[in-house]
Amino acid sequence: MSNINADVEFAIRQFLGREAMLLDNGRLEEWVGLLDEAILYEIPLRISARKREDEFPRGAFRMHEDMAMIRKRLERMGTAENWAEDPASRTVRTVGSIFVEADEGDGVFRVHSALSLYRQRAIDRAYEWIPARRIDLIRVIDDGECRLVRRTVILAETILQTPNLAVFL
Amino acid sequence: MITDTAHTRPGTGGRLDDILARTRSELEKGLVPVNIFANADIFDAEMERIFAKSWVFLGFESEIPEKGDFMQRRIGRDSVIVTRDGKGEIHVLANFCRHRGTKLCQTDVGNQSHFRCPYHGWVFKNNGEWIGAPDKSKAYRGLDTRDWNLFKAPHVESFLGMIFASLDADAPTLMDYLGGAAWFMRGLMDLHPGGMSPMGPPDRYKVRGDWKTGSENFGGDGYHVGVAHGSVQTIQLAQGFDVLNNYSTHYVIPGGHSFLGHDFDSMFGPDGHVWYYPPDIQRHFDLNRIDPLLQDVVKKNPPIVGTIFPNLSFLRFFGPPSPGKPPAVYTSWRQWQPSGPGEMELWSWQLKWNFMDEQQAADSYAAGQFGFSSAGIFEQDDTVVWEGAPEAARSVWARKEKASFNMQMGMEGMGQQVLDTSWEGPGEAWRPGPGEPSQRAFYRHWLRQMEETGE
């Protein structure tokens, strides 16, 4: 039986909103606290193909990261040599179209959302916009607290127009 | 009246011929004028004199394994379709209908025996031949269809599974074009009869840097590693950046190609042999496939980066697939696709040895993408520092000062680098670093191509 109900949906919406706030405010340590230790954060490579199912060649990715890799990224961002984000981009992310699709069992839910991320780097004139969909597995714990177990980011772009993915999506 | 755009549209910092003349005199001093990095006239001339003349890399044979497979690729800024026809032969076709110019192929890959134009319906076989149009007998009874085939690259050749094409009817053979670079490429790719192939399509991202900067950097810039990529050593995912240049050899090959070797044994101890490949990979290699001198290079001074003129480079380095796991060696071929003056797309393929089991391939892919990809902890810093040259090229102040960039490192009287006169391999070997002989040679060759209009 599915346990998707208003409480679950509220908890997930609050979680995604809080996550967006933390990321936009550079509170990355707190953000990592929202990740399950077994997190898989992945961005598959996408190509232009006639059929939707052919857009994601098997096994090809831009990112495919576990907790150790994510922590290393944070460590890197903490060095004085993080030129890609020196200073950190100013970002505003809008997370919407939230849809709790399925109860995967063990308190884990499959959640779809759309992400529209505005990014301005340094004193750059050109703004960058990273549009994506996300398919998350989110664990809802009894008191309504949530953990991100898996995130699959589906970029709208096949050729990325921002020069790097130094920001989390 | 149509006039030569080179004489009607001066870009930033002057006219084409003036910039080239100045580049010639500056290069003699080891300098490169800033103007060449974001100038519309320079860019247009590069498309004609370099990209329409050179052998340009298009992808791997294994990306289009079946009859009818195709992939959309680029020669300079031109979109081309690389097809495998019904006989298994590879063709490189201009991606537009001869009737009105409509794009025939809108996807990155696919499988088709023919391409039908969505505008009026002209149809072409996947070898480029015109084969039909709606109402053909009423509309085109008198058409000599042989005149209306898709434009087809006159020269297409493969080497080590890599497809190249040249749009120049008078081009030398691919092997003549590569010259000594082919020797080094064998050292990289031909250590096993099964060869190498890409693990998926290229990772592609727009970089606001000039294509030449990517080529020149991967051709031999060991000097930036300790600074631009310093963070990776600071977080202990790599080592040896501080001494890297002391163990380097710049192999400078005629034709604008170059390779940057490193003495891995001295840097990393006996495990450094053959790019630090672990024993479970190395036991597959048959070094007797390559000549003794090349074996020596591969064992003791393997190139970790290199550039094939104009815009193809490779990288072979090692790192953990995830922190804490044993390092895996990764190989990326990458292309600096010019998309406009001072901007490019970076296309990067990660390759595996075809003998690898799934886990070995997955580890290599993960380590490679973690380091060098749109999210790579090395590469993301390059994408930012390379934005500077075009910005400087657009600077009025830089133009007023007749600014040049400095590529004098290692020149006589400048540092410790010398030409190794005992080197018996192709081209020249300059060692040790730091030095910039590869970069200077790249721009000298670039200039030769740019001055040779060929019209």
Image: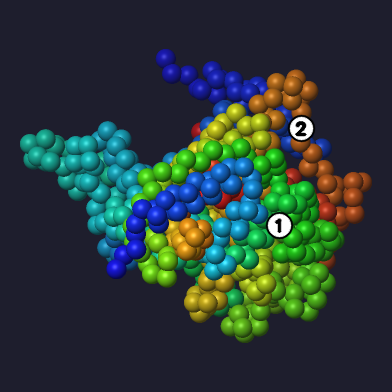
The residue at the point 70 percent across, 45 percent down is: A83
Image quadrant occupied by the N terminus of chain B: top left
Residue that extends furthest to the left in the rendered view of this protein: B138
Residue B324 falls in image quadrant: bottom right
Is residue B223 found left or right of A57 in the rendered image? right
> Disc 1 on helix, strand or loop?
helix
Which residue bears the numbered disc 1?
A: A75
Residue that extends furthest to the right in the rendered view of this protein: B413
Q: Name the spot of residue B175 as percent of width and height, x first.
A: 55, 60
Q: Do badges 2 and 1 share one subunit?
A: no
* Amino acid marked by disc 1: Glu
Residue B246 falls in image quadrant: bottom right
Subunit of mark 2? B
* Amino acid marked by disc 2: Ser
Subunit of mark 1? A
Which residue bears the numbered disc 2?
A: B404
Q: Name the spot of residue A4 as percent of width and height, x first.
A: 34, 59
Residue B186 falls in image quadrant: bottom right
The residue at the point 70 percent across, 55 percent down is: A76
The residue at the point 70 percent across, 74 percent down is: B276
B263 up-or-down from A79: above or below = below
